[in-house]
Amino acid sequence: MALRSAERLKGSKLAFIDGSEGGKTIDFFFDDSTWKIRHVIANIGSWYQNKKVLISPQLVGEPAWEAKSIPVRIHKDDLNKFPLANEAKPISRQYDSNYFDYSGKPYYWDLYGAEVAGYYPDDLLCPPQELEESKGAGRASKFDPHLRSAKEVTGYLIQSPNGKFGNVEDFLFEWESWSIRYLVINTINFWPSKKVLISPDWVKCIHWPDRIIQVNLPEKTIKAAPRYDGENPPSRNYESRLYNYYGKDYYWDEPEHSKQSAA
């Protein structure tokens, strides 16, 4: 499965089934408990009073990467019926349910099962009081808020057991599954500075108010990690070297990933 830059996909035009084009992508909302992109956020320009709307990846075909065009399996005029994207607040799954009721698509948490149906994993959120707030909101509304803006998380600091360094610069995702596989980290506190990749699976916890992502990897280990050039998607050979360096199991050997690749 091809890995693509979320940052580079921003600004892509929407290409509709009626042959028209318009609007552009400006952001992505991802589920912070599964690291899957759930919505493409599109600014539809002067149409419908400059709305920003949610578009499900289920409605998106394979992008034309060089032309920066994204095919969307709807008519252009249908966008005036789509839910608005409120970029100032995290989106709740209750809001998602309203979207999927309109589109006629099954809820993604039904498609993916228990992995997205439960509350926020205890070992991924810090400090503890945030977990209680998340659980309380989940009980009250049935669907707890887990969706985050890629634009919001870009710039978050990375903290290792040795201290803070670098920040999130981009996300690499599989467009077929819309799963975020890597955070692109600019190690600005190291000299010389370089870009490295960190899997979401290696994240210890996320402190949303302070914009900090904690990882279990020592600073010196990350400093010596294979450099990511940022110009081209990482090859499978590069990924293998990266995982071997960190002593991690390959994600592409996981049963769920194998099923997605065969689909």
Image (spheres, rainbow, N blue to C red):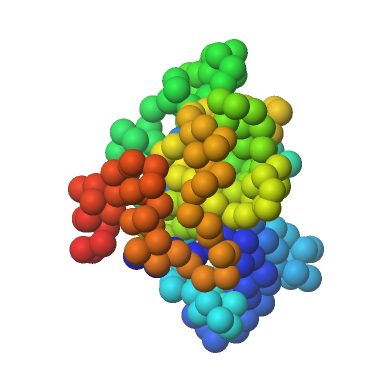
Residue 131 in picture, x, y percent from top left: 53, 18
Q: Picture quarter containing residue 21? A: bottom right
From the top left corner, tell me how far across and down residue 220 is, in percent: 55, 37
Instruction: Name which residue lies at 44% across and 20% down.
Output: 122
The residue closer to the viewer here, 128 or 71, is: 128
Question: Would residue 40 be seen by someone viewing this image from the given angle?
Answer: no
251 relative to 17 in the view: left or right = left
- Residue 203 at x, y = what percent? 49, 35
Q: Is residue 225 visible?
A: yes
Residue at point 53%, 83% (across, down): 18
**Residue at left 28%, top 54%?**
252
Residue 15 position (above or below residue 80): below
Direction from residue 153 to residue 70 in the image, left or right: left
Q: Is residue 74 above or below residue 67?
A: above
Q: Nearer the viewer, residue 93 or 176?
A: 176
Q: Out of 200 and 138, give the one closest to the viewer.
A: 200
For the point 61% across and 32% down, which residue is it? 159
Q: Kindly give the residue lying farthest to the bottom in the view shown.
A: 19
- Quadrant for the N terminus, please: bottom left
